[in-house]
Amino acid sequence: MTIHAGRHAIVAGGGIGGLTAALYLARAGFRVSILERAPVLEEVGAGLQVPPNASRILDDLGVLEPLQRQALQPQNIRIRRGKDGADLSRLALDDAETRWGAPYLAAHRADLHRALLDRVALEPAISLYLDRAVAGCQIRGQEVQVGIRRGPLRLSETADLLIGADGLHSAVRARLYAQDPLTFSGLTAWRGLIDARAAPASLRLPESNIWFGAKQHLVHYPIRAGQCVNVVAIIDDTWTAAPNAQDWDTAADAGTVTARFARWHQDARALIATVPAWRKWPLYERPLIPSYVEDRIALLGDAAHPMMPFLAQGAAMAIEDAASLGRALRATSDIPAALKSYNAMRLQRTQRVQKEAKKQARISHLSGPAAVVRDIGMRMMGQKRLLKRYDWLYAPQQS
Ligand SMILES: Cc1cc2nc3c(=O)[nH]c(=O)nc-3n(C[C@H](O)[C@H](O)[C@H](O)COP(=O)(O)OP(=O)(O)OC[C@H]3O[C@@H](n4cnc5c(N)ncnc54)[C@H](O)[C@@H]3O)c2cc1C
């Protein structure tokens, strides 16, 4: 391992990507300051699927075991048709560890975040500062100067390396890309958590469920060892409010989602009726960018490649980014060269996932004859061939 004695890295953002990056930077010998804009750390009350490509890395960090104590391991992914509940496919996940070398988990976001925070707390090289918003950055010779806002105060800090893990509305990305429009995707995600005792018995099984329908789809899976069921409805929608980093997760009216699913199979309707409170997230897109790095600044996670949630890979890609960043920085003490190598490792794969996730959005929401063709195709393909289509994503990477 290359020793980076006294080298300092600043990580903008204490989300899943930022915390994972900090752990790998510490492993690469850096002193790490995580600057988090929020005055209090709290993850949204929602579920998160942790696929094998992410759980493998969490295992490497010692985070998988504490997470597994609270997460649930779905036995399969069940795909159904919204209007009549017909089964289109069932993909076995119980042999994920044999097939892909790591488990497929369904977790509460807060549990993953907490497991990472607990691991960060054990690492003397990492300091986490709340209520510090990165507001700008500038390369100054061999250093990066980082502008920070703390309430009314304007502060400045220097580092050898800056990682922008500050999400969809990244200030670091804004510094690298001046022309970078944020576009509403035409989809909103409605999320809710149900006490499992209130959910219909057939929907409490340890399965990850996806229902396809015209212009909308539904996902649900149990989390917290089966105590809660996470529900996400994604619908073709309009959104007129200006994108705002502060209020993109808003309370939502249950009547709208109930009406949208009124003609769906009774199981889906029963599930939707039991959600006590919905939160609505407009899904935004940014253009694919030609590079995630500039000199000694790198982007990671949603700051680099925000994606549609249809492959359940946004957080997983942030976790992969962090591991690749660590590997690149351990290989050489030349920071700009290491970041170039990180970029080469990540650009193609993450952009492929972005494109595939968008394609999956279209497939899930097909209607009319196109939906009929999709359903026949899925049934004919069978579970073996369908599962094989995920090998490139879940299996260990070569680089
Ligand atoms: C409906 C839905 C379902 C999803 N399901 C899954 C799933 O099942 N599996 C999966 O892998 N992914 C899923 N995702 C995607 C996943 O949530 C994101 O990709 C992931 O959270 C990105 O992590 P991140 O750390 O890059 O960014 P974020 O989670 O956005 O974290 C960014 C952090 O930076 C902080 N910050 C922002 N600006 C600044 C600043 N200027 N200075 C300092 N700090 C700042 C924020 O407060 C935040 O803490 C889903 C997304 C949606 C919308």
Image (cartoon, grey):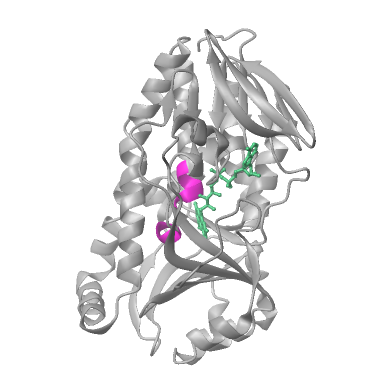
Which residue is nearer to you in this view: 102 or 125?
125
Q: Residue at x 24, y 70 (%)?
A: 382
Residue 4 versus residue 369 in the image, above or below = above
Query: In the figure, residue 146 lies in which quadrant?
Result: top right
Which residue is nearer to you in this view: 312 or 262?
262
Query: In the figure, residue 169 lies in which quadrant?
Result: top right
Residue 99 versus residue 156 in the image, above or below = below
Asked whether residue 201 appears in the rendered view, the answer is no
Q: Residue at x 45, y 10 (%)?
A: 334
Residue 165: x %, y % from top left: 56, 36
Asked whether residue 49 appears in the rendered view, the answer is yes
Residue 3 counted in the magenta span: no
The residue range painted magenta reads: 309-317
Residue 76: x %, y % from top left: 43, 67
Q: Quadrant of the C terminus?
A: top left
Q: Residue at x 55, y 81 (%)?
A: 257
Compared across the picture, whether 82 is left or right of 106 comes to: left
Residue 348: x %, y % from top left: 30, 38
Residue 256 versus residue 194 in the image, above or below = below
Compared across the picture, whether 257 is left or right of 347 comes to: right
Residue 19: x %, y % from top left: 62, 36
Dominant SS in magenta: helix
Q: How many numbered callouts?
A: 0
